[in-house]
Amino acid sequence: MTTPPMTDAADATASAPHLADSHDLIRVHGARENNLKDVSVEIPKRRLTVFTGVSGSGKSSLVFDTVAAESQRLINETYSAFVQGFMPTLARPDVDVLDGLTTAIIVDQQRMGADPRSTVGTATDANAMLRILFSRLGEPHIGSPKAYSFNVASISGAGAVTVQRAGQTVKERREFSITGGMCPRCEGRGSVTDIDLTQLFDDSKSLSEGALTVPGYKAGGWNHRLYTESGLYDPDTPIRAFTKRQLQDFLYREPTRMKIAGINMTYEGLVPRIQKSMLAKDREAMQPHIREFVDRAVTFTTCPDCAGTRLSEAARSSKIGGNSIADACAMQISDLAAWVRGLAEPSVGPLLTALGDTLDSFVEIGLGYLSLDRPAGTLSGGEAQRVKMIRHLGSSLTDVTYVFDEPTIGLHPHDIRRMNDLLLRLRDKGNTVLVVEHKPEAIAIADHVVDLGPGAGTAGGTVCFEGTVEQLRASGTLTGRHLDDRARLKETVREPAGALEIRGASTHNLRDVDVDIPLGVLTVVTGVAGSGKSSLVHGSIPAGENVVSIDQTPIRGSRRSNPATYTGLLEPIRKAFAKANGVKPALFSANSEGACPNCNGAGVVYTDLAMMAGVATTCEECEGKRFEASVLEYHLGGRDISEVLAMSVTEAGEFFGAGEARTPAAHRILTHMAEVGLGYLTLGQPLTTLSGGERQRLKLATHMSDKGGVYVLDEPTTGLHLADVEQLLGLLDRLVDAGKSVIVIEHHQAVMAHADWIIDLGPGAGHDGGRVVFEGTPAELVAARSTLTGEHLADYVGT
């Protein structure tokens, strides 16, 4: 036997892979977040992995709440305890093993803050660079970058300061001033609010005669007594007979402590009191009658001093090449990028390059139609997600995990190709890209697919398939079976019963558009992102008595809010329990008298551990049921209130539909929820755990019984699985067949193919759009192939 030469052994060692190169998988074992059932998957690194499955199957729970959440938590733990005290606390996900994680950058669909001072420019640092540019090159020079910021007010002051000098205390007079760019009239908001006093009171009556018409200010209530018993004016005198001083006290007096009926109270003028109690609240969170009052009483008008630019006169007077910073921010970003490129100033060369690259990223990602002064709160979920992507496109970081939540939302089929290229580019730089997605065009580019299901809610939470796209097609899973689904054009379309005339529409980029929207049919308004669809529909068809508008604004609610409280379902359920047991309805509310005293009806007890992750433990008193033990002794149809809230919508529909628990009001709401595809939700599930698509469909369910004749829906397929789109089309058909007119803003080809009438806007985005480029039936659009939408729809239906 001969011994192999030493050189061969050395070669073998050299060719063996380095131990550091063996970590090429993210391993997840035993994930149990939300509805996940001990899920175990291996995700390849430096590849594009797409997670699919019906809405509510557990995709977000696996990707965002497990993988990304643990990555962020581990990064936070690298900081000192002092720094962690200032950071959001993150609990460890419910998972046995998470191995091979890399730094996660989450690009989700959370809407950007709706603060009136938050704009596209402030959210992306483009404004910060523009302010520096104008402070260096603007003529006349007015000051530092702060002088061009609408978030900085101009202030000045003077006074004595005490300084220690050479062992002696010396007093000196000092003056200071800061030059800011904020418009003093609107305080950088761009609009001013006026309150219509005639909506607050009837001046022909006295306070005693019920002059106040503000909700909650009825005679006898404390709000009313505050004014009638203040002693500042005679409550029996008609308001129009008040002296100037009395009227000032009644409407605008500063907060003043006084005794009313022997109780210490703070008196405040009616106008500031209403501003604090009602106008400071989010409009969507208001009760319907309060919202109606606010809509009547308050008018928002463009600030007359700054013409809506938010900037002071000095900031608007400083210009570069004839353009002020207000002019630059109002330009379409694609035009602004060209203007910046045309500035040849070596002294600010690096700044111009960085600003130009940021603006070019907007154009590249399909947002060149926006302007920097566009309020961030008006961006759709898809637009907000793409704005967040901008800061990552030019990044030199590699081996990072990028996590995207349906990045194709709000994108026309023409724009999806561009988004796919961006995702592939991120992957090709050596990054791991995880995408939660429903669109077949986006699934097609995946290197690896993880399909969750088989159903939603408790029927989901397991991995049905892992592999390539081709293997998915042949897998027989719900996603695999529907991946190549194609809706067919209707053979016959409905005849309109009239028309909604829109004349001279000019909101945002619309160019004096005249169009007739047919009534009594399913109308789809389409076009590339930024072509003016929402501007036409929401800007010209205001929600009113006859119009039910369901847009994509998120549902606001705490962890105490759930589908039962949001839809109003809990009201008839509480009354049914109260009637059956002869007690008060308030006992059956976890936010009122029936709440468990230990956890205050939350079901869990939260322990704050300072800079460490807070811990939520199930309440020992009520065992997570949220109600006092005595309340759970009352039954309806053999179930207590906590058991009813644990039911799914489908189960509750059967329970309240017949037998002893029959409650028609509750059954009607549950039927609507099932019709929009939410049969799997449990009644007591916190709203904060619902996906974006689930929330919009929950909104749709609440409006199903509204009296409106016209329904306006904004991309209802958002977050819908391919298998659920068919159910949505059936729902839209039922609405139209019931005599409603349905207008849908949509990019999904299945909805376009199913329409009776299509209005296509374009031909491009921003100032290249804003015109109607086609009106007619889907068949006519496919035959003409005259627009981008026509070409993609023709390819989709296979003609």
Image (cartoon, rainbow, N blue to C red):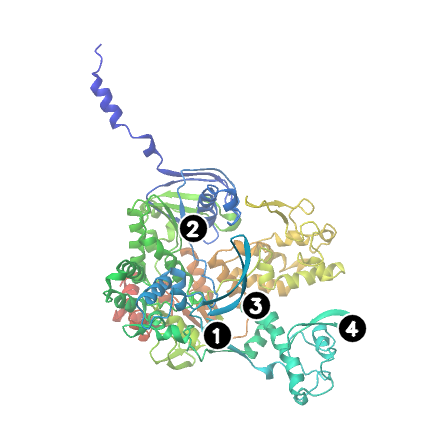
How many C-alpha atoms fall within 10 Å of the one at disc 3: few (<14), some, or many (≥20)? Answer: few
| Disc 3 from disc 2: Cα separation | 37 Å
Q: Amino acid at mark 4?
A: Ala
**Cβ–Cβ under 8 Å for marks 1 and 4:** no
Instruction: Nearest to the eye among marks 2 and 4: give it.
Output: 4
| Disc 2 from disc 1: Cα separation | 48 Å
Where residue 666 sits: x, y (%)?
62, 63
Residue depicted at x 24% and y 24%: 12
Mark 1 or mark 4: whose residue is earlier in sequence: 1
Q: Amino acid at mark 2?
A: Gly
Instruction: Nearest to the eye among marks 3 and 1: give it.
Output: 1
| Disc 3 from disc 1: Cα separation | 19 Å
How many C-alpha atoms fall within 10 Å of the one at disc 2: few (<14), some, or many (≥20)? Answer: many
Residue on which the image places disc 3: 281
Q: Quadrant of residue 24?
A: top left
Where residue 54 sits: x, y (%)?
44, 52
Q: Which mark is residue 186?
A: 1
Residue on which the image places disc 2: 53
Say if 777 sits above or below 199 in the image: above
| Disc 2 from disc 4: Cα separation | 63 Å
Label 1: state its secondary structure. Answer: loop
Is residue 609 shown left or right of residue 408? right
Where residue 617 sits: x, y (%)?
61, 44
Instruction: Nearest to the eye among marks 2 and 1: give it.
Output: 1
Q: Which mark is residue 261?
A: 4
Which is more toward the observer, 203 or 730? 203
Q: Amino acid at mark 1?
A: Cys
